[in-house]
Image: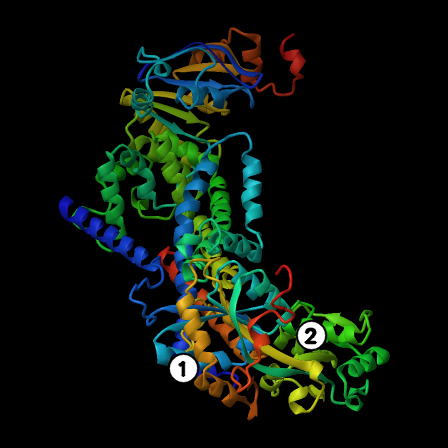
C-alpha cells in the first residue's frame, strides 16, 4: 500500500514536470536552414491589422512556407519600441519619419516600400465647416479651425497622428481649444468617438472602409487615390530587425516574409484585398523603375556626414 | 457580421482555452505562494506586521497595465530574462497574472486567518494541541475565507486585460487560432473595430465561465 | 495530578497581574477560585493550564516544573490537563469531531495524514463505525450522546458548553481547569455540568475552577481561594471560608458587598 502510493506520486510529479517543461520550450531551433514550423514575430499597427489584410497574407505565407506568423498589433510607437527591444523579427508600419529614425539608429535593415493607401478627412454628413468645398488638406483644416467645428485627433503619435500634425504644420496652424479633442485611442475607437460627437477627423481609408457599416461619417475630402491632395498619401514600409543588434531575431524568416509580401504573389494579394467591395491598399513594392529612396532614410545621401 | 465568430467555433474555443489555461495556472501557482505567506503572517506577531498587511492590501489594487509593463521590462528579449524567450507567450501572461492575483489571495486569506476567534485557538491549544495543531485547526476554521480569496484572485486574473495585452500581445494566427488572445483582449479588439455586439457577447461568455468556475469550486468546498 | 503554585507572579509589559500566588491542589480535590471581575482569575487558570509562563515563582505538576523541561516534555504534561473556557468555542465540524479532537491530535503524523486522506473518499475503507465509542462515552457524561452528528451551529448555548466540556473530558485529563464554565448556562445545564465535575473528582482527577457564583462555590468545592487584585487573600476549606472567613475582605465579598470604593477595600 505504501509502495504503490509512492510510485503513483512519483509518476504524477514526473508528468507535471514534463508538461511544464513542454510549456516553456523555446522556438524551433531546427539548424537545417529550413523555416518550416517556425514562428515569425511581426510587429505592426492596430489600424493595419484591424483591416484583416494581414490575416490573408499570413495565411498564404503559412501555406507557402509552413511557418506561422504571430502578428502583434500595437500602437505605432509601441510597435517600434517593441522592435527596438528585439521583441519582433519584422516590423510593418506607416510612419516614414519614425521608420527613418529606426533605420538611422541601426535597428531596421532592408526596408521596402510595401503598399500605400491614403488618408481622408471624414466628418458629419451635413459638413458644417464646408470641407467638401476645399481641395487641399491644408485648406480643409483651415476651414475646420475657422468654423471651430469639433475635430477629433488620435493624439497618440501614431502614423495617422503624425500625418495630421504635418498637415496642421503645413497650414501654419496650431490647433487648440474646446473644438480640438485628443482621444489617445486607436483609429477604430477614434472614428466611433467622432461619429458619436458629429466631429471631423483624419483617418486612413482602410479603417474608414472597413467601418463603413458601423459609423455614419462621410468622406469630406478625398485622398490622392481618389484624386485628392498628395499630402494625404499614406505609405507603408516593412523592415527586418538588425540581427547584429539583437541576435535572437529570426532574420532568415523575416527576410522570407519580406520577400513574400514584396513578391508578385504577395503584391497581388494586397491589391486584391477589398473591404465592402472597395480596394483598401495599393501595392508599390515592385516597379520597372525601382525607387531607391525606399531602402534608406528619406534624406540620406551617400556622402552625408553622420547617420 | 456581428456574431460571426460564433460560426467559427475554433476561434472562440481557442480564446476560451487560452483564457482558462492562463488564469487557472496563474491561480494555482499563486495560491502555492500566497497561502503559506498568509498563514505565516497571520499566526506570527512581529513589529511591522500592520505595515506588511497594509502593503499586501495595497497590492490588491495594483494597476494591471503597470504590472504588465514591469513584467515586459524583465522578459523583453533585451532584458534580464530575455534568454527565456517569454515575451508574447502565454507563459508570460501566467507570470503577470500571478503577480496580480497573489496580493488578492494573500490578503483575503490573511484576513480570514486573523478573524478566527482567539478563543478557538485557545481551545485547540487547550485540548493538547501543538502550535502546528493550532495552526491547522485555525486553517480549517478559516477555510471558507481562504477559498473566497482564491476565487477572488481568479476573478481578478481572468477578467483583467491590461497586463495580458502588454505581455501577450493579443496574438492570433491567420487561421484564427489564438496564441495569446484571451477573451478580455478579444473584447478590446472587437471594441476597437466597432463590433460592440460581438464584444458584449464575449463579455457574456466570460461571465458564464467565471460563474461555472465559482460554482464548481464552491460545490467541491461543500457549501 | 498534584498542582502546586509557589510564589507565582505574572505580569505583562509593566503591569503586574498576579503577585506571589501560593496554592496547592491534590488529585481528587475541587478547588474554586472566587473573586471580583478583573482580579486575575482567568490568568491564574491559564498559568495552571500552562498557557503562560510565570514571570516569577514556580509551578509544579506532580513535583516537576514544566517550564524547566523541553517543549515536548512539557507538551506531555500539558496533555494531562484539560481546560474549559467560558465560551464553548466549538470548531466548525460535527459534534463528534469536536469531542475527539483531543484523541486525534495525539496520534502520530502518518496516521493523521492517512486519516485526512481517507476523509476525502466518499465512503469508508473499512468497517469501522462512524463514531468512536469513547467519544460517545464522553458525550454521555454530559447527557448529549445522541448529538454526536449534529452541527455545532444548531446547538443551544447550554448544549454547546456541554460539548465543550465533553471535548475536555474525552482527552482523559488528570487535571481539569474550568474558567466560569456555567456562567452563561441555565440551572438545568449547570446541574448537568456540576454532576460531571463531581464525577471527575470521583475518578481521582483534580479540578481547579473559577466562578463568580458563590452558591456554586459553596456547593461543590472542597477548598476555596479568594483572589483580589492579583493576590490570594485567603485559602481554606470551603465551609470555613464561607462561614468563618479569616479576612475582613473575604467576609465582605462573600456577603455580596459589591458597592464599595476601591480605596475602602484596603482600609
Is B105 placed above or below A226 here? above
Residue C73, located in which quarter of the rendered image? top left
C60 and C184: which is toward the camera? C60
Q: Position of residue A210 (x, y in %)?
A: 58, 85
Q: Residue furthest right?
A: A146
Q: Residue furthest front?
A: A303
Residue A28, located in which quarter of the rendered image? bottom left
Mark 2 or mark 1: whose residue is earlier in sequence:
1
Whether callout 2 and callout 1 share a subunit is answered yes
Is C82 placed above or below C150 here? above
Is A293 placed above or below B20 here? below
Residue annotated with mark 2: A163
Q: Position of residue B9 (x, y in %)?
A: 39, 79
Q: Using the numbered discs, state the Cα–Cα distance from disc 2 to disc 1 in whole angstroms.
A: 31 Å
**Residue C185 visible (yes or no):** no
Give the residue drawn at x 59%, y 82%: A116
Q: What chain does badge 1 belong to?
A: A
Locate the C terminus of chain C by quadrant: top right
The answer to whether residue C60 is left or right of residue B195 is left
Give the residue drawn at x 56%, y 22%: C38
Is A161 placed above or below C181 here? below
The answer to whether residue C85 is left or right of residue A187 is left
Residue annotated with mark 1: A60
- How many labels were placed on the picture? 2
Task: Say which mark, if any, is on residue C218.
Answer: none
Q: Secondary structure at mark 1?
A: helix
**Residue A301 visible (yes or no):** yes
Q: Residues within 10 Å of mark 1 (few under 14, many from 20)?
A: some
Q: Secondary structure at mark 2?
A: helix
Give the residue drawn at x 50%, y 90%: A272
Q: Are marks 2 and 1 in contact (CB under 8 Å)?
A: no
Amino acid at each position: 500500500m505504501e509502495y504503490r502510493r509512492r510510485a503513483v506520486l512519483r509518476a504524477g510529479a514526473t508528468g507535471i514536470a514534463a508538461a511544464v517543461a513542454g510549456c516553456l520550450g523555446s522556438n524551433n531551433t531546427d539548424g537545417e536552414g529550413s523555416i518550416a514550423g517556425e514562428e515569425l514575430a511581426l510587429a505592426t499597427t492596430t489600424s493595419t491589422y484591424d483591416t484583416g489584410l494581414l490575416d490573408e497574407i499570413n495565411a498564404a505565407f503559412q501555406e507557402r512556407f509552413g511557418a506561422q506568423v504571430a502578428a502583434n498589433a500595437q500602437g505605432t510607437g509601441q510597435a517600434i519600441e517593441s522592435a527596438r527591444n528585439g521583441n519582433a523579427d519584422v516590423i510593418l508600419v506607416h510612419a516614414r519619419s519614425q521608420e527613418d529614425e529606426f533605420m538611422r539608429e541601426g535597428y531596421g535593415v532592408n526596408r521596402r516600400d510595401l503598399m500605400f493607401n491614403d488618408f481622408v478627412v471624414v466628418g458629419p454628413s451635413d459638413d458644417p465647416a464646408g470641407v467638401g468645398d476645399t481641395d487641399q488638406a491644408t485648406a480643409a483644416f483651415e476651414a475646420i479651425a475657422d468654423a471651430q467645428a469639433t475635430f477629433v485627433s488620435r493624439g497618440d503619435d501614431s502614423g495617422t497622428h503624425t500625418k495630421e500634425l504635418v498637415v496642421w504644420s503645413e497650414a501654419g496652424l496650431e490647433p487648440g481649444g474646446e473644438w480640438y479633442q485628443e482621444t489617445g485611442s486607436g483609429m477604430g475607437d477614434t472614428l466611433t468617438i467622432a461619429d458619436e460627437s458629429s466631429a471631423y477627423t483624419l483617418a486612413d481609408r482602410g479603417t474608414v472602409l472597413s467601418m463603413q457599416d458601423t459609423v455614419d461619417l462621410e468622406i469630406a475630402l478625398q485622398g490622392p487615390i481618389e484624386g485628392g491632395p498628395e499630402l494625404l498619401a499614406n505609405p507603408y514600409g516593412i523592415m527586418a530587425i538588425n540581427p547584429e543588434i539583437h541576435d535572437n531575431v529570426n532574420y532568415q524568416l523575416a527576410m522570407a516574409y519580406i520577400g513574400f509580401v514584396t513578391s508578385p504573389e504577395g503584391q497581388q494579394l494586397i491589391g486584391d484585398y477589398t473591404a465592402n467591395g472597395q480596394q483598401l491598399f495599393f501595392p508599390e513594392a515592385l516597379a520597372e523603375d525601382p525607387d531607391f529612396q525606399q531602402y534608406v532614410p528619406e534624406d540620406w545621401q551617400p556622402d552625408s556626414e553622420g547617420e | 457580421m456581428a456574431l460571426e465568430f460564433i460560426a467559427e467555433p475554433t476561434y472562440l474555443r481557442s480564446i476560451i482555452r487560452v483564457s482558462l489555461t492562463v488564469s487557472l495556472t496563474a491561480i494555482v501557482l499563486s495560491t502555492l505562494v500566497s497561502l503559506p505567506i498568509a498563514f505565516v503572517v497571520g499566526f506570527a506577531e512581529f513589529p511591522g506586521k500592520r505595515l506588511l498587511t497594509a502593503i499586501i492590501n495595497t497590492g490588491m489594487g495594483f494597476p494591471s497595465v503597470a504590472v504588465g509593463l514591469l513584467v515586459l521590462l524583465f522578459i523583453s528579449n533585451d532584458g534580464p530574462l530575455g534568454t527565456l524567450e517569454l515575451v508574447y507567450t502565454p507563459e508570460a501572461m501566467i507570470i503577470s497574472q500571478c503577480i496580480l492575483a497573489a496580493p488578492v489571495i494573500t490578503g483575503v486569506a490573511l484576513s480570514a486567518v486573523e478573524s478566527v476567534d482567539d478563543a478557538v485557538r485557545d481551545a485547540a491549544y487547550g485540548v493538547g494541541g501543538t502550535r502546528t495543531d493550532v495552526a491547522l485547526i485555525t486553517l480549517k476554521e478559516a477555510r471558507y475565507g481562504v477559498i473566497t480569496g482564491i476565487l477572488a484572485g481568479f476573478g481578478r486574473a481572468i477578467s483583467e486585460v491590461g497586463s495580458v495585452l502588454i505581455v501577450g500581445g493579443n496574438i492570433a494566427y491567420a487561421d484564427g487560432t489564438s496564441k495569446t488572445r484571451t477573451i478580455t483582449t478579444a473584447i478590446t479588439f472587437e471594441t476597437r473595430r466597432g463590433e460592440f455586439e460581438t464584444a458584449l457577447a464575449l463579455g457574456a461568455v466570460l461571465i458564464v465561465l467565471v460563474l461555472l468556475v465559482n460554482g464548481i469550486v464552491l460545490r467541491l468546498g461543500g457549501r | 495530578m498534584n498542582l502546586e503554585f509557589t510564589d507565582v507572579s505574572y505580569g505583562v509589559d509593566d503591569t503586574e497581574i498576579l503577585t506571589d500566588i501560593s496554592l496547592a491542589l491534590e488529585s481528587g480535590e475541587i478547588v474554586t477560585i472566587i473573586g471580583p471581575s478583573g482580579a486575575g482569575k482567568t490568568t491564574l487558570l491559564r498559568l495552571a493550564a500552562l498557557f503562560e509562563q510565570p514571570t516569577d515563582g514556580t509551578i509544579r505538576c506532580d513535583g516537576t516544573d514544566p517550564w524547566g523541561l523541553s517543549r515536548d516534555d512539557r507538551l506531555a504534561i500539558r496533555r494531562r490537563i484539560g481546560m474549559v473556557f467560558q465560551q464553548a468555542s466549538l470548531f466548525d465540524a460535527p459534534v463528534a469531531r469536536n469531542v475527539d479532537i483531543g484523541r486525534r491530535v495525539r496520534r502520530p503524523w502518518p496516521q493523521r495524514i492517512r486519516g485526512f486522506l481517507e476523509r476525502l473518499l466518499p465512503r469508508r475503507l473499512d468497517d469501522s463505525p462512524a463514531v468512536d465509542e469513547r467519544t460517545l462515552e464522553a458525550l454521555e457524561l454530559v447527557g448529549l450522546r445522541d448529538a454526536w452528528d449534529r452541527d455545532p451551529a444548531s446547538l443551544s448555548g447550554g448544549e454547546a458548553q456541554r460539548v465543550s466540556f465533553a471535548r475536555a473530558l474525552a482527552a482523559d485529563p488528570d487535571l481539569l481547569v474550568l474558567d466560569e464554565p456555567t456562567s452563561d448556562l441555565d440551572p438545568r445545564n449547570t446541574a448537568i455540568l456540576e454532576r460531571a465535575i463531581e464525577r471527575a473528582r470521583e475518578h481521582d482527577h483534580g479540578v481547579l475552577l473559577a466562578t463568580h457564583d458563590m452558591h456554586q462555590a459553596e456547593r461543590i468545592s472542597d477548598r476555596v481561594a479568594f483572589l483580589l487584585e492579583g493576590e490570594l487573600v485567603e485559602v481554606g476549606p470551603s465551609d470555613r471560608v464561607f462561614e468563618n472567613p479569616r479576612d475582613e475582605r473575604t467576609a465582605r465579598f462573600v456577603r455580596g458587598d459589591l458597592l464599595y470604593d476601591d480605596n475602602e477595600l484596603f482600609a
